[in-house]
Amino acid sequence: MIPIRSEKSYTPQDRAKQRKYKHRQRQLAGVRVHDLAALGKAILLCDDCTPKFNAAPVGYATNVKMPRARGQCDGCLNYTPAGVLFLKGGG
């Protein structure tokens, strides 16, 4: 029979181990942005992340009518008040 561990059965040492290795579950920024590009989604990048994204090979370009947008950067996940908006095909 398999023992079932409830939330109360975890020791403080077990919880410390879980917190220590939790960062390994995150996804790299480049992978996240290229996954969005593969799905054809709009991509918003801050000024720091924009030079790292090569938009031409994946068929993306900045939107001519609305080149800047406000929101969460898809690369670093930080809020950007004036990020660059990329659309599939250039919008």
Image (tube, rainbow, N blue to C red):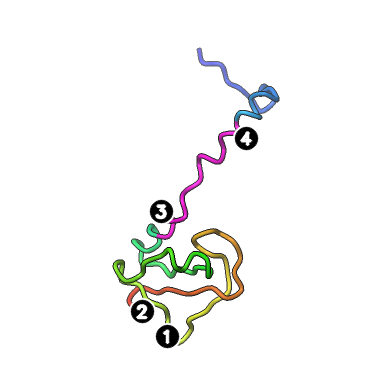
Q: Main secondary structure of the magenta part?
A: helix
Question: Mark 3 highlights which residue?
Answer: 31
Between marks 3 and 1, how big is the CA–CA gap? 26 Å
SS label for mark 4: helix
Number of other residues with Cα within 10 Å of mark 4, as a class: few under 14, some 14 to 19, many 20 or more = few
- Do the CB atoms of the residues marked 4 and 2 lie less than 8 Å apart? no
Between marks 3 and 2, how big is the CA–CA gap? 21 Å
- Do the CB atoms of the residues marked 4 and 1 lie less than 8 Å apart? no
Decide whether residue 43 is among the magenta residues: no
- Do the CB atoms of the residues marked 3 and 2 lie less than 8 Å apart? no
Between marks 2 and 1, how big is the CA–CA gap? 8 Å
Tell me the kind of residue under disc 1. Answer: Val
- Do the CB atoms of the residues marked 2 and 1 lie less than 8 Å apart? yes
Tell me the kind of residue under disc 2. Answer: Gly
Please report the bounds of the magenta region as a residue range.
18-33
Question: Mark 2 highlights which residue?
Answer: 90
Question: Mark 1 highlights which residue?
Answer: 64
Number of other residues with Cα within 10 Å of mark 2, as a class: few under 14, some 14 to 19, many 20 or more = some
Between marks 4 and 2, how big is the CA–CA gap? 42 Å
Of labels 4 and 3, earlier in sequence is 4
- Do the CB atoms of the residues marked 3 and 1 lie less than 8 Å apart? no
| In the image, farthest residue toward the top | 1
Of labels 2 and 1, earlier in sequence is 1
Number of other residues with Cα within 10 Å of mark 3, as a class: few under 14, some 14 to 19, many 20 or more = few
Of labels 4 and 1, earlier in sequence is 4
Tell me the kind of residue under disc 3. Answer: Val
Q: How many marks?
A: 4
Question: Mark 4 highlights which residue?
Answer: 19
